[in-house]
Each structure stands twice: as structure tokens, then as C-alpha cells.
Image (cartoon, rainbow, N blue to C red):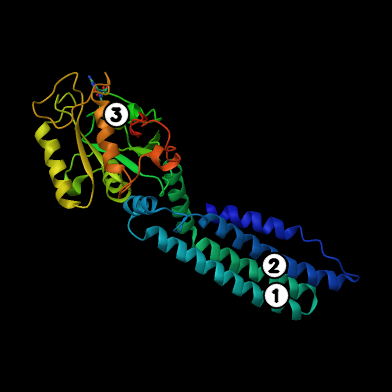
Amino acid sequence: MPSAEILDVAFHRASLANPHGSTKPERDRRRAQLKVVRSSATVARHLRLESRGLRPPALGELEKALVDRAFGAGVLDRALVRLHRAEERIRRAAREAERAVGTAAGSEELGDQVRAFYGRLASFVREIDPDLERIRQVRRYLAGRPRLDPEAPRLVVAGFPNVGKSSLVARLSSARPKVAAYPFTTVAIAVGHADLGFDRLQVVDTPGVLGRGGRENPAEAEAETTVRNAATVVLFVLDPSESSGYPIEDQERLLARWREEYPALAIVPVETKADLARRPGAALAVSAKTGEGIDELWRQIRARLAPRGPMPPVEEAWEEPPAPEEPERPPARSGRRRK
Ligand SMILES: Nc1nc2c(ncn2[C@@H]2O[C@H](COP(=O)(O)OP(=O)(O)O)[C@@H](O)[C@H]2O)c(=O)[nH]1
Ligand SMILES: [Mg+2]
């Protein structure tokens, strides 16, 4: 139990108190004071450490949304509030105990006061055991997930299970997610990076979504939460070969639903596994296996990510204008191929 761990450390530290003082009564009183101060300060510091990084802005928007989705809305916040209140109560009790120790007559009464304070301290901490436990669960949950940089754009790759999302993420970024021929291989989001030239793109792999409304599993919920809260652009992966095991109509229904539910989202649909099957008239057909169509996919992604407003070509922005006597140069172009 977290409370037992914290109290062990606190009481141990307090027991090491070795006060100065010329007489024994003086030392006894000083020792009792040190025990109160050290035990309470140690507990307070631990409570701070337990909650560190779990409030915004240290806790990012996506992380907060994921935690709310996985643990219930407000569950983490309430646990943190109870920790904070416990800390306040402990400080108050410690001040009272210090005063009582200051006026106690004799070593017996000093011992009684310290024991009474230890009892209160222990019950304050035990009371928040469920909160400490919950907070540690949240921390473990977050430890298994990447921290996204809110400043850099995020391409969230989403779609039905087994359609080839992770394979595309591997094609597009530094990430090497697990690829397998069965659904729900990816159970948590993962992130890779790609160099856009003007920015670093975060490519986020997500678990498959079946779009079953309220009956979604935690992995599906995580994917949809990421689409909603983190995506600069959503790459919606469709598998027309149906080797995923899911009819293309079901996949398209989810795409249509997301377009309706999240009208502000930039969604780029892409049909993958073009080496197996392709539909006539597909806007964008690619294959993660052969690399076919990937350049065109990059063009479409970059078009959706390009900084808004008129931007001069890179060379024009940096180069001095040519001297008048120089012969005319062909116009500078910014179409360098970068990924
Ligand atoms: N032929 C072919 N198979 C692919 C392609 N992309 C993925 N696959 C296969 O489809 C299965 C699911 O791929 P995966 O990337 O794990 O899909 P995810 O569940 O959507 O992440 C795996 O067996 C892959 O090898 C592709 O472009 N062509
Ligand atoms: Mg996957």
C-alpha cells in the first residue's frame, strides 16, 4: 500500500533525529519537535512527488483527455484534490503538535504527544490510500504512452483494425510499430517522427476503431480520443482489399461519421494495400508494402500542414537579390524533396 510505504520512510527519518542540547530534558523536547517536523515534512514531500506532473500544463491536453477517458472524467482531479487537502491537514496538525510539544511537562508527556501526532499523521495518509493508488495507476498508464509535443504538428493515423495503419506509420516515420495480420495488435498510441523541412511532424499510430458507438473497447476509445484531441491532420486508412476482414462499406461509414461529428478536423482518406486491390476512382491509393503512392500521399499531407498565408520560397527569403549586372537566373524554387 502506498500509505504504508510513505509512513515507513517518514517515521524512519523522524527516528534518526539527533538533537543538540546541554540537558536531557532539553534534548528530549527538541527530539520530540524534530520527530513531528520531520515526519510531517517527509509525508508532505512524498505527496507532492506523487502528484507531480499530473496537472496541466505539465499534463498535456491529449494526456488529460486519455486519462479522463480511461479512468473516468474528473477521477484524477478529485484524487489530486484529496491529496492536496490531506497535505494541508497534515501541516495544520503538525503545527498544533509542535505547540503541544513546546509546552509539555516531562518526557512522558512528550512521548504521548509524539505518539498522538503519529497516529493522526498515519490516519490522514491511510485515508488517501485509494487516491494514491489511483494516481499511481494513472502514472503507469501514462508511462506507456508517448508525450506529444504540442508545438509540432501531429498526423494521427486512424481507421479500422488490421487495415495497415501501423505499416503506413512505419513507411512515413521513424516509428517501427508492431505489424501483424490480426486486429488490435496496436493497443495504445505510439509516435514516430518525420522531417517536414519547415517542421518536425509527429506521426501517431492508433489502435483500430470499429465505430460501434458505446460498445467500444478501451483501445478504440484511446484511438478516437487521440483523433479528437491531438490531430492536426487525420490520415484515415481504408483497406479496399478487405484482407483486414472488414467490409469497405463499414470503413466508409466510420469515415462519414467522423466527418460529420468532427467537422473542424482535417481528414485525409487514403486507400492502402494497392498492391492487393484498388478501386477505380480512389482519390489516393498507396501500398505500404511496395511504396506505391507514398510520394503523392506526402504531397497531400504537406498541403494540409503547410503554414497558412503566403510564404515566400525558401531561397527567395534567404538569398540577396541578384546584382543588376548578373544575367537572369531561372526563378528559385522551393520544391526540394524532403520527407
Ligand atoms: N499486401 C499488403 N499488405 C499490407 C499492407 N499494409 C499492411 N499490410 C498487412 O496487413 C496486416 C495488418 O497490417 P498493420 O499495419 O498491422 O495494420 P493495423 O492493424 O491497421 O495497424 C499485416 O499483415 C500487414 O502485413 C500493404 O500495403 N500491402
Ligand atoms: Mg496497428
Asked whether, in this view, residue 50 is left or right of residue 291, the answer is right
Instruction: Please give the residue where the numbered disc 2 appears in the rendered image.
Output: 37
Instruction: Please give the residue where the numbered disc 3 appears in the rendered image.
Output: 168
As drawn, the residue found furthest toward the right would be: 22
Q: Amino acid at mark 3?
A: Leu
In the displayed structure, would residue 152 be above or below residue 44?
Answer: above
Q: Quadrant of the C terminus?
A: top left
Instruction: Please give the residue where the numbered disc 1 appears in the rendered image.
Output: 98
In the rendered structure, which disc, 3 or 1, sits on the residue that comes first in sequence?
A: 1
Tell me if label 3 and label 1 are in contact, CB under 8 Å.
no
Q: Position of residue 71 (x, y in %)?
A: 35, 53
Of tags 3 and 1, which is closer to the observer?
Answer: 3
- The reply to whether residue 183 is in sight is no
Q: Amino acid at mark 2?
A: Val
Question: For disc 3, does the CB lie below 8 Å from ligand 1?
Answer: yes
Q: CA distance from mark 3 to mark 1?
A: 64 Å
Of residues 335 and 199, which is closer to you in this image? 335
In the displayed structure, would residue 110 be above or below residue 246?
Answer: below
Q: Amino acid at mark 1?
A: Glu
